Amino acid sequence: EDNIIVKVGHCLENEVFDEMEDYGDAILSPGFFDLHIHGCMGQMPEESAEAVVHLSHFLPSTGTTSFLVTAMTKKGLIHAEQAMGMPQKAQIKGIFMEGPFLSPRNLEAADKSIVAPSKEALNELLEISSHIVMMGLGVEQPGAKEVIEELKKQKIIAAAAHTKASYDEFAEAQKWGLTHGTHLYNVMTGLHHRRPGALGALLSSKDKTTELICDGVHIHPSAIDIALKCM
């Protein structure tokens, strides 16, 4: 109702269908929406617009019918913007910039695309594309405040991503307009009983959203249960 799923159950519980078809053990459901996916088959937006289109053709095989292209660099953003004008199968609903304002990891290969957060650098990205709907950044970085505040003005979701923020720093970023945390548990400060970290800040937030990578590798199944009980 009004684009919101109001009930999940067996069709025989709801005798509202004029015609019935038996699909055996298959599950009939609305298409999945993936808000954070970097690519498939070894291809990423940083390589080409065709890599984004390839992803859109692959995703329906997983039940995913719409997604946000996830780019990390200016080059990836350009390719994502180009792909939005090309034929798609799973529909591109916008762009998630997971970068370039991330916290350094002190690894040369990982840090080479990182840029310090600033309004000027943000405006360069916004000039490339008007389809950015979410941006992830290291919220404890100098300059993060002005970027988060500008994102809020532009109605772009500000997300904590690859952050070394303490609990207090994270709480301060929430006052600026931070509303989302990427891949809960991963690449963020963890939960200690005296230092709750970014993880503790997210788990104890009543009005924030987050993501989980439920592949059984990135996080333990019990950690998923804890997150679902808290969020």
Image: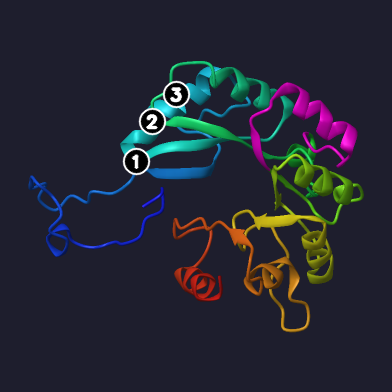
* Lateral position of residue 150 relative to residue 35, left or right: right
* Lateral position of residue 25 relative to residue 200, left or right: left
Q: Secondary structure at mark 3?
A: helix
- Quarter of the figure that contains the C terminus: bottom right
Colouring method of the image: rainbow
Task: Indicate whether 200 appears above or below 182.
Answer: below
Disc 1 from disc 3: Cα separation = 14 Å
Residue at horizontal 8 percent and vertical 45 percent from the top? 19
Res. 62 mark: 1
Res. 54 mark: 3
Q: Are the residues at dot 2 and dot 3 in contact (C-beta closer than 8 Å)?
A: yes
Q: Which residue carries the number 2 mark?
A: 58
Q: Are the residues at dot 1 and dot 2 in contact (C-beta closer than 8 Å)?
A: yes
* Lateral position of residue 6 relative to residue 175, left or right: left
Circle 1: residue type: Thr
Q: Position of residue 135 (x, y in %)?
A: 70, 43
Residue at horizontal 32 percent and vertical 36 percent from the top? 61
Residue at horizontal 56 percent and vertical 75 percent from the top? 230
Res. 90 mark: none
Circle 2: residue type: Phe
Q: Position of residue 128 (x, y in %)?
A: 73, 22
Range drawn in magenta: 113-134
Task: Indicate whether 220 appears above or below 72.
Answer: below
Q: Position of residue 192 (x, y in %)?
A: 72, 78
| Of callouts 1 and 3, the N-terminal one | 3
Q: Quadrant of residue 112?
A: top right
Q: Was residue 195 drawn as part of the magenta stretch in this picture?
A: no
Circle 3: residue type: His
Residue at horizontal 11 percent and vertical 46 percent from the top? 23
* Lateral position of residue 167 relative to residue 12, left or right: right
